[in-house]
Amino acid sequence: MEMKELLAKDVIGLNNELTELLKAQFKLRMQKGTQQLQDTSQLGKTKKEIARVKTALTLKAAGK
């Protein structure tokens, strides 16, 4: 999801998105640990998405 789309969401929507991404990251980490994860690049992509959502939340809190 692009930053423009994230900034268009409200704080509740961003928090929901963050929760879903954190759950997905946990599942990917567990799959990696049990050697079931085929595409390990998904971990990095999910991590970057989490960072984008957190940045959008910070910008919303700062009022920008």
Image: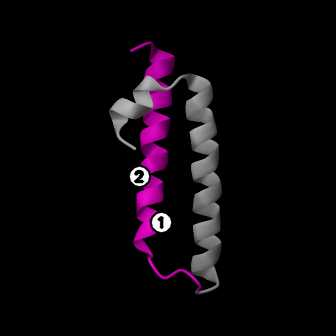
The vertical placement of 37 against 53, above or below, is below
Crowding near the residue tagged with mark 2, few <14, some 14–19, many ≥20 C-alpha atoms within 10 Å: few
Q: Main secondary structure of the magenta part?
A: helix
In percent of width and height, residue 47 lies at 46, 55
Q: Quadrant of residue 56?
A: top left
Image point 64% across, 44% down: which residue?
19
Q: Which mark is residue 48?
A: 2
Query: Residue type at mark 2?
Result: Lys
Residue named by callout 1: 43
Count of picture labels: 2
Image point 46% across, 16% down: which residue?
62
Task: Report helix, strand or loop for mark 1.
Answer: helix
Question: Viewed as shown, does residue 26 lie left or right of 61?
Answer: right
Task: Report helix, strand or loop for mark 2.
Answer: helix
- Magenta stretch: residue 52 in it? yes
The vertical placement of 35 against 41, above or below, is below
In percent of width and height, residue 28 lies at 58, 69
Magenta segment range?
36-64
Q: Quadrant of the N terminus?
A: top left
Q: CA distance from mark 1 to mark 2?
A: 9 Å
Q: Which mark is residue 33?
A: none
